[in-house]
Amino acid sequence: MLRQSLSQLSLHTEGEGFTNITHLIQAEVSKSGMGTGLCLVFAKHTSCSLTINENADPRVLQDLAAYLQALVPKEGVRPISGEGALRAYVHNDEGPDDMPAHIRTALTATTLSLSFDQGRLLLGTWQAVYLWEHRAVSHRRQLSVHLIGE
């Protein structure tokens, strides 16, 4: 029989960077008692995102962060051609990292769909689920975890 479960998770980030949340999501799957199904994880914020990525070599996460910082610099934006003046972001209500965080979120994902079987998330050997904080200071982040399965 098909069932569903909806729960909310709250976690603290230490500022810009990655927080491995695989164990938190797995705990929700285990707690549900469902064996097989789909898990939808949603970050309820506009300045952080979710990603599935390498969990064995921390340099992968360092390179990802460096790439996104180069793609979306905190100082402002230039034309795609690279020619022309730097234009500071107009939206800076919460500080200089506010608008870059919104852009980084728009370029990544706030929702992930994960399958599970026999009560375990189906992730690859070297995969983990991360909350990717795009703001410089620590934040309390809220996640919605929706499970549909049997």
Image (cartoon, rainbow, N blue to C red):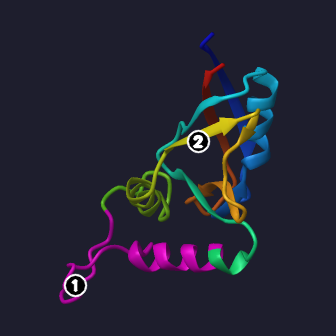
Q: Residue 128: x and y, percent?
A: 69, 57
- Above or below for 6 versus 86: above
Comparing 19 with 27, the one in front is 27
Q: What secondary structure is the stretch in magenta mostly built from?
A: loop
Comparing 132 with 52, the one in front is 52
Is residue 74 part of the magenta span, yes or no? Answer: yes
- Marks counted in the figure total 2
Q: Amino acid at mark 1?
A: Ala
Name the residue at 44% across, 61% down: 104
Q: Is residue 147 left or right of residue 31?
A: left
Is residue 84 part of the magenta span, yes or no? Answer: yes
Cβ–Cβ under 8 Å for marks 2 and 1: no
The segment highlighted magenta reads 61-89
Comparing 124 with 47, the one in front is 124
Name the residue beneath numbered marker 2.
Answer: 114
Image quarter for residue 83?
A: bottom left
Image quarter for residue 102?
A: bottom left
Name the residue beneath numbered marker 1.
Answer: 85
Name the residue at 35% across, 73% down: 76
Q: Residue 142: x and y, percent?
A: 64, 36
Residue most toward the bottom? 83
- CA separation, marks 2 and 1? 43 Å
